Image: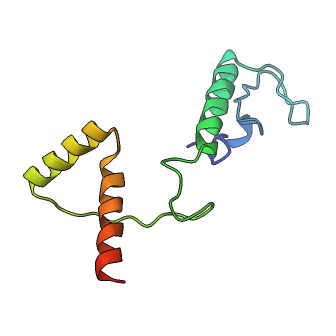
């Protein structure tokens, strides 16, 4: 199981802070250093670095509510014909369907909600 920082949790003492697995061969020296590190540890370290890089990126699109805030979302159901028209308009205007819906909602609210 990968941790939030890219390490592997639950793997026991064979996992170092950087996330690479250490395979101990021979008697313990009384410290945390492995006597020999498996080549698998290098692959885990690389995978952990990639995983950490991915986890550090903010998933999804930028917030519409401001930095550090999550934008609320709304799921709606549409007739298939309306969705097809919306998708065609979005493709023609090279915009996302959600942008068009937000603009239409803003216009509607300005007209009807003051």
Q: Is residue 48 above or below residue 88?
A: above
Please tell me which residue lies in front, 109 or 44: 109
Give coordinates of residue 97: x percent, y percent.
30, 49
Quadrant (top left/top right/bottom left/bottom right) for the N terminus = top right
- The quarter of the picture where residue 48 lies is top right
Give coordinates of residue 73: x percent, y percent.
38, 64
The colour scheme applied to this rendered structure is: rainbow
Please tell me which residue lies in front, 14 or 5: 5
- The quarter of the picture where residue 57 lies is top right
Q: Is residue 82 above or below residue 56?
A: below
Please tell me which residue lies in front, 54 or 95: 95
- Horizontal side, residue 18 vs residue 67: left or right: right
- Horizontal side, residue 97 vs residue 79: left or right: right
Q: Residue sitting at 68 percent across and 45 percent down?
A: 5
Give coordinates of residue 100: x percent, y percent.
31, 54
- The quarter of the picture where residue 56 lies is top right
Give coordinates of residue 114: x percent, y percent.
37, 83
- Horizontal side, residue 58 vs residue 15: left or right: left
Q: Residue sitting at 29 percent across and 62 percent down?
A: 104
Q: Residue sitting at 71 percent across and 30 percent down?
A: 20
């Amino acid at each position: 199981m990968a941790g939030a920082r890219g390490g592997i949790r639950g793997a026991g003492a064979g996992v170092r802070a950087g996330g690479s697995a250490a395979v101990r061969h021979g008697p313990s020296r009384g410290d945390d250093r492995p006597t020999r590190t498996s080549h698998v540890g290098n692959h885990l370290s690389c995978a952990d670095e990639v995983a950490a890089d991915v986890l550090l990126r903010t998933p999804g699109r930028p917030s519409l509510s401001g930095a550090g805030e999550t934008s609320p979302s709304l799921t709606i159901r549409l007739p298939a014909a309306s969705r097809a028209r919306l998708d065609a308009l979005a493709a023609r205007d090279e915009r996302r369907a959600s942008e068009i819906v937000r603009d239409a909602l803003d216009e509607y609210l300005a007209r009807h909600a003051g």
